[in-house]
Image (cartoon, rainbow, N blue to C red):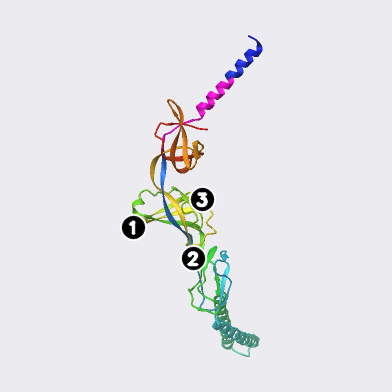
Amino acid sequence: MTLRGWTGMTLALVVATLLASQAAAAEFTVKPIERPDNKAVFGRVESRDLVPARARLGGTILSLSVEEGSAVKAGDVVAVVVDDKLALQLGALDARLKALDAELRNANADLERAQKLLESGVVPRKQVEGFQTRADVLTNQRVAAEAERSVLAQQRSEGEVIAPAPGRVLSVPVTEGSVVMAGETIARIAGGGYFLRLSLPERHAGQVKTGDEVLVGRRGMTDIGDKTPAGRGKVIKVYPEIDGGRVLADVEVEGLGDFFVGERTRVWIPVARRQVLAVPQLALVTRSGVDYVRVALPAGEAEVPVIAGERFEENGQAFIEILTGLRDGDTVVLP
């Protein structure tokens, strides 16, 4: 046999081997796959912390530096509350301190003169001790007045209402010029991040577990009738109490920072497991609105009409659920 003949035979064998391997790789055996049975519910956006910024001083609100929706950091000044009586009391204490300073100067001068006269024997020691006592009393009175003034100054500085935590201001129930009491709420701040709170029927309480993955719909509930998820989340807490036939569960989802507190969105949460028949998505062919799957039969290949269901991913491969048209063990020919 010539060299050209050998080359032709070798090429034919290589092509046949490749075709056989492709044919073997292009077949898929239909087997039941366990899938979570998701239930569509509504999730409500909640904040982890809801803390009030309270007034520490009773008085009149002089200024407000926040409004609904403002972002604040811990320590930011939310409002300033003033009490006019504190200014009057501080003025009275300042005048009292000036009077005490004048009296203390005279007492120290009298004491100094008495001490000089005592050395020359003109005045008795008892009189010098009286001047010393008077000077000590005035000194202590001045220290007490200064401490009292420090207390009033501290109360005046507490007129600044401080944000206790970082977050977003939900409501400001007061306005400038409002009269408030000590401890009254000036602003409500939502902080600590957002999560979704679900309310599920009592019959699903035993199926919902911490760590379950959920699907989150689009914001504004614009995906009614569409099961394509816009995001994913994870159940972080299931409350051990049933109230009114409902059980609560919290879901952690990234990207909820721009949601409104109290906003609702659709959530699909697994409440059971079920067996489904599915094929790779590329095996499905649609003609004139009808879905077909090519199946290998003993007499050859044939296209079988099917009814497709939900699309999902399994081990990184796209699958589609087949509701009717296929049986367990069928061999599907992939394109």
Q: Position of residue 214 (x, y in %)?
A: 45, 49
From mark 3 to mark 2, how far is it between C-alphas? 29 Å
Other residues around mark 3 within 10 Å, as few (<14) / some (14–19) / many (≥20): some
Q: Position of residue 245 (x, y in %)?
A: 33, 57
Which residue is identified by label 1?
A: 245
From mark 1 to mark 2, how far is it between C-alphas? 29 Å
Horizontally, is 128 left or right of 326 in the view?
Answer: right
Residue extending farthest to the front is 288
Other residues around mark 1 within 10 Å, as few (<14) / some (14–19) / many (≥20): few
Q: Which residues are magenta?
A: 14-33
Q: Is residue 123 above or below residue 54?
A: below
Q: Is residue 193 above or below residue 63?
A: above
Q: Residue at x 43, y 56 (%)?
A: 42
Pointer 3 and pointer 2: residues touching (CB < 8 Å)? Answer: no
Amino acid identity at mark 3: Gly
Viewer-closest of 73 and 310:
310
Which residue is identified by label 2?
A: 51
- Does the magenta run of residues contain 2? no
Name the N-terminal-most of marks 3 and 2: 2
Q: Element under label 2?
A: strand
Residue extending farthest to the bottom is 122
Which residue is identified by label 3?
A: 231
